[in-house]
Amino acid sequence: MDKLSSIEAFICAVESGNFTEAARRLDISAVMVGKHVRQLEELLDSRLLQRNTRRQHLTEAGESYYQQCKAALAQLRLAEDTVENMKRTPSGLLRISAPLNLGSAAIATLVARYQLNYPQVRIELDLSDSFVDLIGQGFDFAIRIGSLHPAEPLVAKKIGDYRMVVCAAPKYLAQHGTPQTPEALYQHRCLANMAWNKSNAWQLGDVFWPADSSFICNDGQALRQAALAGAGLVLQPEILLAEDIAAGRLVPVLQQWQQASRPIHLLWRQDLSPSEKRSSFIAWLHEQLPLALAV
């Protein structure tokens, strides 16, 4: 017999007044109730209940043990209810890693809207183009663009497509002309992200975006501002430039060589236990991100 069952039987025997009524409430035999109580008395080496043919009463040790066990069981039930409630209602901390440009342009807004729906969830959103170690650094989710590393022990779910567009300010095009082919990029001032390298370089047809760009920065918003100022051609996510394009502040070029989109995946650890918090976030991002990207 386990100790918790014995404690529950002891408390029930005290509160019901006798072993027979306790047995009825617990759906066990009165003999089994007695065995539970005797097991506790042997374990504690103390008499807990004094019984005769007509009544029972707690000893001094029994009274102390009863009060403390009752409080402990109440606390245990509260803990169980809390965990059960967490399964039903999303709550607790979500740690999310996302790429800088996509994160600032779309993910931050979507995460904030998710939190409005589930206010008991606390959000920690880390924006970086570095690949975080979900297991080692304790992240719940990571959002990544492009091909995945199959060796990673992670679950991956595609949640959208990352589309790029080449744009320039009207004043830049008026001064330098509009490129008609990707090869013409080498005669233009091009803005580039210093995070791009041979493994993640963007390509138009057979032409890679010029590595020897005239303006290099590690932030998409800064590159956008440089393009708006007329510093050159910019290659950035469509979602980041959509409002400028719609307003005529930037003009798309080389559209017939539209960049091939790259998949966006949501990743999480295989060992994560299911919870309403995680399940609701996966469902939310899978539904909302494609809508945000459909500019």
Image (spheres, helix red, strand yellow):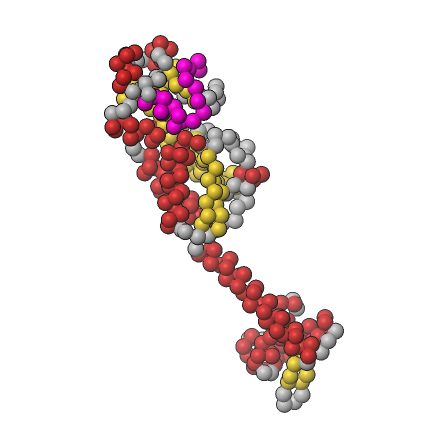
Q: Quadrant of the C terminus?
A: top left
- Give the residue at x 35% y 17%: 231
Q: Is residue 148 above or below residue 174?
A: below
Can the viewer see residue 33 in this picture?
yes
Picture quadrant of residue 15: bottom right
Question: Could you tell whether 37 is left or right of 143 in the image?
Answer: right
- Give the residue at x 27% y 24%: 249
Q: Nearer the viewer, residue 243 or 287?
A: 243
Q: Is residue 283 above or below residue 265?
A: below
- Give the residue at x 69% y 76%: 61
Horizontal and vertical percent for residue 89? 43, 55
Q: Quadrant of the N terminus?
A: bottom right
State yes or no: residue 21 in magenta.
no
Q: Is residue 148 above or below residue 73?
A: above
The tally of labels here is: 0
Horizontal and vertical percent for residue 210? 41, 15
Question: Could you tell whether 56 is left or right of 91 in the image?
Answer: right
Q: Nearer the viewer, residue 94 or 104?
A: 104
- Give the residue at x 37% y 49%: 116
State yes or no: residue 215 in magenta.
yes
Horizontal and vertical percent for residue 136? 58, 38
- Magenta part of the chain: 211-228
